[in-house]
Image: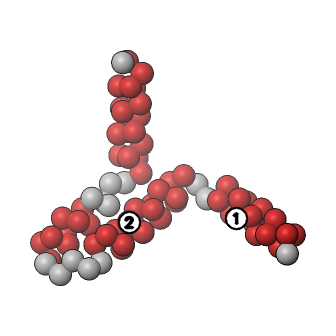
Amino acid sequence: MMMKIKIIVLSSVLALAACSQKNWYQGMQEAGRQQNCRDIVNELDKEKCEEQYQVDYETYQKQRQDVLNAQDKN
């Protein structure tokens, strides 16, 4: 039983390492969109919700770096 768990954990770690950060980010964006916007009935509200999850990886990285640089200055 313990060996099975170790194999599963190791397989998971290797699988995660194989994914690029960009793919991970895109997957999390899609998961967030699906989870948070799926039950919205009003089309306008649904579009607004989905817009939150349309930030591409490059834009995200730039925004993230800007925040980190601002923190370093403080």
Secondary structure of the residue carrying tag 2 is: helix
Q: Quadrant of residue 33?
A: bottom left
- Amino acid type, callout 2: Gly
* Local crowd size for mark 2, using a 10 Å CA cut-off: few (<14), some (14–19), many (≥20): some
* Local crowd size for mark 1, using a 10 Å CA cut-off: few (<14), some (14–19), many (≥20): few
State left or right for residue 1 relative to residue 69.
Answer: right
Q: Which color scheme is applied?
A: secondary structure
Rendered location of residue 65, percent (x, y):
41, 34
Rendered residue at 37%/54% (across/down): 56
How many numbered badges does the structure rendering display?
A: 2
Label annotation for residue 12: 1
Of labels 2 and 1, earlier in sequence is 1
Rendered location of residue 16, percent (x, y):
65, 59
Residue farthest toward the front in the current orientation of the protein? 1
Label annotation for residue 32: 2
State left or right for residue 59 relative to residue 2.
Answer: left
Q: Quadrant of residue 41?
A: bottom left
Quadrant of the image containing the C terminus: top left
Rendered residue at 38%/46% (across/down): 60
Is residue 6 or residue 68 the one in the foreground? 6
Q: Quadrant of residue 67?
A: top left
Q: Is residue 49 visible?
A: yes
- Amino acid type, callout 1: Ser
